[in-house]
Image: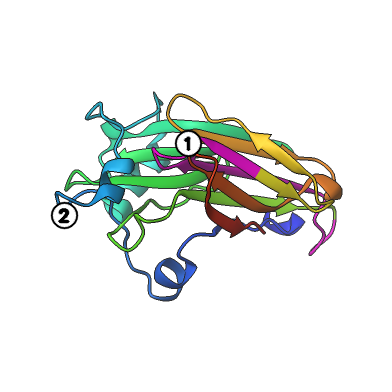
Amino acid sequence: MKNAGLRRKLLWLAVVVVASGSVLTIAGTAANDPDADRWAWGTGDVPGQAITLDRAALGSLEFSDAVTSASVRELVATTTPGDRFALLAARDINGKVCFSAVTTKVWGGFSCMNDLAEDKAFIHYSASGGSSLGATEWSSTVGVVRGDVRRLVGVTRSGVETGIALNQWRGFGYRSTSFAHVLTALRAYDEDGSLIQETPVG
């Protein structure tokens, strides 16, 4: 994937996550914080489908991410050429919910949301590439929305708006195999139809 110009990015709070290396956290916020409630799932469990991890993934969790292996779930998955692109959720040793985007070839670390991040309506990870370095001929995006998001729309390079479905855990996935259909932005709307977040993709 790296030879095809794959770019795996957390396109959300890039300054906080990438530049400073800070860890994001969902839990442990003020009791009256409405954004914290919107990021809850109401079941007490990590959202998603239980998965089986191989030994290498288990080692990564236990020694670098401090995420409990038994809590790892898959929220949503799509594909890249010749691979699978999934969004995982898990709890760390302090009970906080964290997310990671992974493929069968690349295991990404988990990041957890902090108080500064909970006003975001969604998070997403994207991968893209092509037949030569720097070319963008396909893209895949996975993510998860906050509880008050009722509609998610993607904007493509050709300027077309396309609705993106949410699953039962509020996860979403999008895949394009042509340059014109590559996403350039994601827009989230609440139940009143008001735009609550627009974020570039790519």
Q: Is residue 120 left or right of residue 59?
A: right
Residue drawn at x 41%, y 42% as measured from the top left? 146
The mark nearer the N terminus, 1 or 2, is 2
Q: Nearer the viewer, residue 124 or 94?
A: 124
Helix, strand or loop status at disc 2: loop
Residue 30 is labelled as 2
Asked whether residue 144 appears in the rendered view, the answer is yes
Quadrant of the rendering where the C terminus is positioned: bottom right
Residue 91 spot, x, y in % from top left: 27, 41
Magenta stretch: residue 147 in it? yes
Residue 135, quarter of picture? bottom right
Q: Is residue 193 above or below residue 16?
A: above
Residue drawn at x 48%, y 41% as measured from the top left? 190
Q: Tell me the kind of residue under disc 1.
A: Glu
| Image depth: mark 1 or mark 2 in front | 1
Residue 94 spot, x, y in % from top left: 16, 48
Magenta stretch: residue 128 in it? no
Q: Nearer the viewer, residue 22 or 164?
A: 164
Q: Is residue 129 above or below residue 68?
A: below
Q: Is residue 130 left or right of residue 60?
A: right
Extent of the magenta region: 132-153
Helix, strand or loop status at disc 1: loop
Residue 191 is labelled as 1
Q: Tell me the kind of residue under disc 2.
A: Ala
